[in-house]
Amino acid sequence: MLLQIHEPNQSPEPHAKPKGIAVGIDLGTTHSLIAIHENGAVRVITDAQGRRLHPSAVSYHDGKATVGHEAFNTTEQVIITSAKRLMGRGTTAIDSVAVSADILRHLKVLAETDLKQPVSRAVITVPAYFDDAARSATKHAAEQAGFEVLRLLNEPTAAALAYGLDNNTEGFYAIYDLGGGTFDISLLRFERGVFQVIATGGDTTLGGDDLDAAIAASFLAHVHYTETLTQKDHQRLLQAARLVKENLSTQPSADMTLYLPPRDCSHRFMREDVEKLCLPFIERTLTHLKNVLQQAGVASVDGIVLVGGSTRMPLVRQKVQEFFDKAPLVNLNPDEVVAIGAALQADALTNGSDTLLLDVTPLSLGLETMGGLVEKIIYRNSPIPLAKAQEFTTYQDGQTAMSIHVLQGEREEARHCRSLAKFELHDIPPLPAGAARILVTFTVDADGLLTVSAKEQTTGKSQRVEVKPTFGIAMEEMAQMLYESLEHGQEDMRERLLIEARVEGQRVLEALRSALYKDSSLLENSEYSLIIEQETALKTAIVGTSRDAIHNAMEALEEACAPFVERRVNTAIQAALAGRKIDDPDLEKMISKALG
Ligand code: ADP
Ligand code: MG
């Protein structure tokens, strides 16, 4: 099988890499795995105790790291877990790159011990929505650990590869990944040998940990325990709850017994009861599922892949099956599929490939326009690389500079989006409002990096900025932005329409002022005062919050201005016929309309 996958931060390489050993690594939030393709099959590498999953946990003593299962066996008070959540986030108390590097170093040693040879080349998986900063942080961590990163591969794509979906018929595939602390849903399209991640969504604060917490709370209620727990006891409680949850995936009931000072507490959990506790969380995943499918405009899928330890729960499988009316693929271990896919990819990369994978922009990109509104240029989930251009114009007569504010996010107002860059385009020829033509182009390359350029069309004057966020957007923050946009969708739309009405009203007022300045002599006193009266009414409506009131006031003002406009047009036509220049674009339009 020839296979080539093209992902962010990676350009397709014309030359095959020298052959050698290469591993696949799933650098997970809760667990990490390392796997190798050998003798035509993938094998998950185990530690000396035969364990396949290694906790993504590190404890430090005198600067020395203890990683994985052992991290929990040290006497250190602080055990760092979930460092992945901080990747690419910039300055925080925890150096997530260094922690991830320690985890990767640990995996490297496991592989080298197992394979009895140096291991230095790897394919490492990342969530589909990791942005550029999070991806390069991951790459840095791998390099610190002594790996050469052959490719950063999206987790859902790795899962698809593990199931050999690239050998399948063309179609849509949903990858449902419920791990320890996160839920990710990705929609892939496989077409003409090309894999495309067409939509991603999920919840970075939803996973097996929530189920553990719910079971733990239920346990305390059942045993009538009301004391305050120490941090260590709370940790033990959660671990016991997790064990109950995991046992209930294969057993109808599970006993939980735990010493909580000052007594032993115990309760028997039935599967149905725990399923009732878990249902609301699973239903939340289905809501995300529905949103992603809706957003992508996809009604049904050709296959569903379950990923993540939490999808071992029978209730999860049942609900997903009901949702799609189709059985998900489950014959591989859900907590291993990502590592398996990475190992397949590592092997394929040493042999060449013919599948091209496209990626998508995780959030919309746009510009701030009048009134603090956002004009989206590139929509969320657009396949990259791509370039899109849009024409903008000036707002005021004689305007010679334009401020370009680049934003990321789904909301309608700039203040609710993330500011990526600001720059100014100068030396726009002084023209009447609305006459200048400025072409703004957004280009997102295959690495997910954005370049914005603005070009004034008549002079050819241009400006460009490369937008490289120095602080990556954390996945929580990114998810937050998405949720808020969904939550506030209607309210935002109302607000947007109101702001648009205000901007339009303001434009009318300014046009009127400039017309009165030039031609008020064409008006009778009574006409003049009527116009001023309506002008005042419009000004009042603009500061109010009713869009209808603004529209009504604009109509009334236009009506009051009708004779004025007619006289201005006539005068202008006469002037034009007499060979004089007309420098009012509004009038020009009216004249050409009047002349048919
Ligand atoms: P991550 O990708 O976040 O590192 P994993 O895919 O390893 O996470 O999933 C870890 C989660 O899966 C934990 O919450 C764990 O309790 C849960 N899990 C593992 N096995 C089972 C099981 N048999 N039944 C239910 N949940 C399970
Ligand atoms: Mg995972």
Image (cartoon, helix red, strand yellow):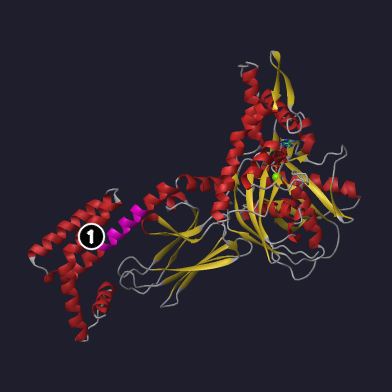
Report the quarter where the C terminus lies.
bottom left
Residue nearer the viewer, 360 or 468: 360
Asked if residue 457 lies left or right of residue 39, the reply is left
Dominant SS of magenta comes to: helix
Residue 207 visible in the snapshot? yes
User: Seen from this angle, which residue lies furthest front?
Assistant: 325
Query: Element type at marker 1?
Result: helix
Residue neighbourhood size for the residue with mark 1, other residues' Cα within 10 Å, grouped as few (<14), some (14–19), many (≥20)? some
Residue 229 visible in the snapshot? no
The question of residue 500 being in magenta is answered with: yes
Point out residue 189 in the picture as x, y percentages from the top left corner.
65, 59
- Residue lying at 20% horizontally and 60% vertically, measured from the top left: 557
- Residue lying at 71% horizontally and 37% vertically, measured from the top left: 314
Residue nearer the viewer, 188 or 317: 317
Residue nearer the viewer, 330 or 202: 330
The region drawn magenta spans 497-509
Residue hosting label 1: 555
User: Seen from this angle, which residue lies furthest top?
Assistant: 262
Point out residue 529 in the picture as x, y percentages from the top left corner.
11, 60
Quarter residue 579 falls in: bottom left
Kind of residue at disc 1: Glu
Q: Considering only vertical position in the picture, is 405 above or below 180?
A: below
User: Seen from this angle, which residue lies furthest right?
Assistant: 116
Point out residue 106 in the picture as x, y percentages from the top left corner.
80, 44
| Ligand 1's quadrant | top right
Quarter residue 168 falls in: bottom right
Q: Considering only vertical position in the picture, is 538 above or below 268?
A: below
- Residue lying at 61% horizontally and 60% vertically, measured from the top left: 448
Asked if residue 582 lies left or right of residue 61, the reply is left
Point out residue 391 in the picture as x, y percentages from the top left corner.
43, 69
